[in-house]
Image (spheres, rainbow, N blue to C red):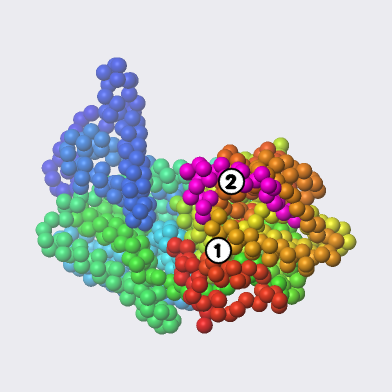
Amino acid sequence: MSQQVVPPTNSTDQTIVCYAPTMITTNGIWQGDNPLDYSLPLFILQLTLVVVTTRILVFALKPLRQPRVISEILGGIILGPSVLGRSSKFAETVFPLRSVMVLETMANVGLLYFLFLVGVEMDIGVIKRTGKQALAIAVSGMILPFFIGVGFAFVLHQSTEFVRLSTFILFLGVALSVTAFPVLARILAELKLLNTEIGKIAMSSALINDMCAWVLLAFAIALAENDAMSLASVWVILSSGAFVVFCVYVVRPLISWIIRRTPEGEAISEFSICLILTGVMISGFITDAIGTHSVFGAFVFGLVIPNGPLGVTLIERLEDFVSGLLLPLFFAISGLKTDVSAINGVTTWILLFVVIVLACAGKIAGTLLVSIYYKMPFYEGLTLGLLMNTKGLVEMIVLNVGKDQKVLDDKSFAIMVIVAVVMTSIIGPIVTNIYKPGRKSVSYKRRTIQRTKPEGEFRIMVCVHTPRNVPTIINLLEASYPTKKSPICTYVLHLVELTGRASAMLIVHNTRKTGRPALNRTQAQSDHIINAFENFEQHAGFVSVNPLTAISPYSTMHEDICSVAEDKRVALIIIPFHKQQTVDGGMEPTNPAFRTINQNVLANAPCSIGILVDRGLSGSTRLAANQVAHHVAVLFFGGADDREALAYAWRMSEHPGINLTVMRFLPGEHAFDTTGSARRNPSARREILSVETNDDREQQLDEEYLNEFRSRTTNDSSIIYTERVVNHGEETVAAIRSIDVIHDLFIVGRGQGISPLTAGLTDWSECPELGAIGDLLASSDFAATYSVLVIQQYVGIDALGDAMIGTPDSPTHQQPEQLDLGNRRPPPPGHAAFQPQP
């Protein structure tokens, strides 16, 4: 290895590094070799350092709601000359000059494939369909910052005399005016704004902005590579145009032909995938040879790939490796090139501050003007302006190309990187504080099945994770007996986990009913789910279906579920149990996160909730009217939850195809001994006391409700009512096991507190959130063919009101209107207060 220093003609060309091509892998430390003198071990160490640093930062910045890009750039800055690199020993050992070439090459390969994926995921059709509003916001949000960039260029240009002013202007203008689409999508989803009107406008505008930025970037590069605006620049622009035309009219039909040759339902062949991945490299090579950046070719190549199974396959094969391992390298390199100490002197820092303020203000002002023109509220316009300030990948590419082409010196580069980091990082916290969507304080009375009018609309919200949940839920809805007098309004909420992928976001963005193929697996699933429910809506009478999608991290998914339930004024939420039935009849967990969601919803739901343990429920639409389709059993132990379970089953029993068995369990004379012994147990004493104070009132309500149920259904041969006297948990289990196997649905209340009838059952319960009886029926020991619906009644009503209401709103039991005022318990945390209706 030799190193030679050349007389300084230009500060950046001071060092020429020669390296021996044989020094790639080491002979081993036992031979006396230092692994860090060889390029491969050194590269592996650098990659590990970059990934570990960015991951630690991602974790540390999560509470501050920072996007991943911020962690990746900061990781680079920490490893670079600004922090750790200040120690020359660290810089020479871990990031020596000779290693930069390998590092940059790999980072650019990662960038190439990442932009190919961005192209595959981006739907040009969306741009065609966006309204004038989004277009106007995108354009106005680019023009003002662009001019601010131009002004800033004049100020900075004096120190960088060797660059032509026009090129410098173009680079700074593009860098300040772009909006990062993937970063914005992530921020919107975390702030729960994706499904809102403002979120949709922001996404559409960012898409248009992104496309404009690419065109401008291609121009900027074409101009940067030539000292004078000569014929060469014109050739660069013309040949880039020719490349785009070639991709659209030659490459796209070829790929469509490959897709058509693949039989439906089969995977795309390995050969085709390999061909396309090679095509990415070739496109990059061609555009680099033409004179634009190689990523431009990869991006255009990605854009021409038709949406559908091929796009899904490519994204699934590449995304984790590219965006998890290689892309952080690119951002880290941007950080490694950033030397914060280059920004010296008070005037430069003031200049930096002015640029940040002006660039933000330019975007906000441009967006605000348009939003006011379209009569949007001021706060929404301000929020949109802030959201359009997200920076990310495109800006980093612009800055890196600028630095490589010597358009930006170290100082300008460092200033611009810090501008990008600051602008993107302040958005999340500011928007959270400014934009409080006008959550109308929703007040509605019918928060339980028991209080829903028999001749009124019955509103249910069903949550679905995968298409597997759909058939049983549809059959359950159909069994809920929608009629002309009491139609069922169903809200179908597809729950999608928010990952770092842009692909999960686009599901919101694709307008339905276009007959277009799905963009990815999540959307394909969503389409299947929605189609199944819409099909049900067409074939069943008096049912309306409204599909919705909730995209958020599993940890906050319950907030989405509860707020949708409240906005839509539903009386019952049905959510799938976190275990599914295996082939041999046992139960296995699908995803542990589903259990947490269920527990959180149970704690915060603004209405009644049912957890559905799905063991299949055959459809009844296909049977003749006189055939019995379902045998439903209700196990009644007493309490609000059991009354709610009975209310739902009572509604079902009106269906001509449903037989209902209600089994009431009564404590025998020895039952209270169990409770007595429990009372002597100090740990259980408090719970028993609280149960006993409410006991008389609950028993009175149970008696009233059951008497009404029996008096109304005495002549109905499809309803059987039985009572069983049991003394303790074992007898209860034996009684449940003795019930006929013909039942295919059990509806039970979740039940809280200790009851002598279930004593001992809770000691070994696997899922306490289902209550003692629900857990027993859902356990693998009861490997049976019936589904179970465990219901918890919403109890946000004060004791007095509940005691006087007690029964459904029937002509004989019309509740006093004034009761509904002022006797509500405070709502669960995180929810709008329920105002009494005037």
Q: Secondary structure at mark 1?
A: loop
Question: Residue placed farthest to the left in the image?
Answer: 345
Q: Is residue 690 visible?
A: yes
Q: Up-down: is 372 above or below 64?
A: below
Whether 293 is drawn above or below 174: the answer is: above
* Number of numbered labels in the structure image: 2
Q: Label 1 crowding class (10 Å Cα cut-off): few <14, some 14-19, many 20+?
A: some
Mark 1: amino acid:
Val
Residue 399 falls within the magenta-colored stretch: no
- What amino acid type should be assigned to the residue bearing mark 2? Thr
Q: Viewed as shown, does residue 764 lie left or right of 281?
A: right
Q: Position of residue 335 (x, y in %)?
A: 28, 49
Q: Residue furthest top?
A: 30
Q: Residue at x 57, y 49 (%)?
A: 754
Q: Is residue 407 visible?
A: no
Is disc 2 placed on a helix, strand or loop? helix
Q: Nearer the viewer, residue 417 or 406?
A: 417
Q: Residue at x 60, y 56 (%)?
A: 575
Nearer mark to the viewer, of 1 and 2: 2
Residue at 41% x, 52% y is 295
Residue 322 x, y percent position in the rendering: 44, 45
Q: Quadrant of residue 565?
A: bottom right
Residue 165: percent from left, percent from top: 23, 65
Near-viewer residue (273 or 365): 365
Q: Give whichever of discs 1 and 2 has the lower sequence position.
A: 2
- Disc 2: which residue: 675
Of residues 235 and 255, the one nearer the viewer is 255
Specify the segment rendered in magenta: 661-690
Is the residue marked by circle 2 packed among few (<14), some (14-19), or many (20+) residues within 10 Å?
A: many
What secondary structure prevails in the magenta region?
helix
Q: Which label is found at residue 795?
A: 1
Q: Are marks 1 and 2 in contact (CB under 8 Å)?
A: no
